[in-house]
Image (cartoon, rainbow, N blue to C red):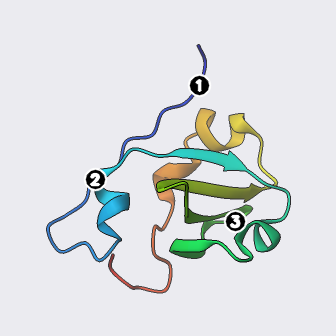
Amino acid sequence: MGIPIELHAFGPNSSLDPLIQQTPHVAFKTSDIEAALKNAKILMPKYTPFKGYTCAMILLNEQPVELIETTLSEREIWGDGIFKDSVLYPDGTQH
């Protein structure tokens, strides 16, 4: 199909919302993540794991949904392995 699938694993001390840890989620691109987050129930605050890519997680109809604002192409994100050196929590906070 050509659709990247990303699987997550969480350690026993993860501070991420249990819903994020236990429920698969979809991700959608947005051109304005700030507007998309307005009045939303935020499960994971906005962060930038690497340059040109910002994401957050909200609760929509009782389901976790990841929102992504990026200037990168799918090939730049997935094809060239940019995730290999990404920092999940750049401020040093463990989740």
Q: Residue 93, located in which quarter of the rendered image?
A: bottom left
Say the numbered circle drawn on residue 22. 2
Horizontal side of 48 relative to 63 (left or right) equals right
User: Which one is earlier in the sequence, the residue at label 3 or at label 1?
Assistant: 1
Residue shown at the point (84%, 64%) measured from the top left: 32
Q: Which residue is mark 1?
A: 3
**Which quadrant of the figure contains the C terminus?**
bottom left
For mark 1, give the secondary structure: loop
Residue type highlighted by circle 2: Gln
**Callout 3: 10 Å neighbours few (<14), some, many (20+)?**
few
What is the C-alpha distance between the residues marked 3 and 1?
A: 22 Å
Residue shown at the point (68%, 56%) measured from the top left: 68
Horizontal side of 45 relative to 88 (left or right) equals right
What is the C-alpha distance between the residues marked 2 and 3?
A: 28 Å
Residue 73 lies, in percent from the top left, at: 77, 41
Mark 2 or 3, closer to the camera: 2
What is the C-alpha distance between the residues marked 2 and 1?
A: 22 Å
Residue type highlighted by circle 1: Ile
**Which quadrant of the figure contains the N terminus?**
top right
Q: Going by the picture, which residue comes out furthest to the right?
A: 31
Residue 29 lies, in percent from the top left, at: 73, 49
User: Which one is earlier in the sequence, the residue at label 2 or at label 3?
Assistant: 2
Say the numbered circle drawn on residue 59. none
Q: Which residue is mark 3?
A: 51
Horizontal side of 31 relative to 82 (left or right) equals right
User: Which one is earlier in the sequence, the residue at label 2 or at label 1?
Assistant: 1
Q: Are marks 2 and 1 in contact (CB under 8 Å)?
A: no
Residue type highlighted by circle 3: Lys
Residue shown at the point (38%, 59%) measured from the top left: 20
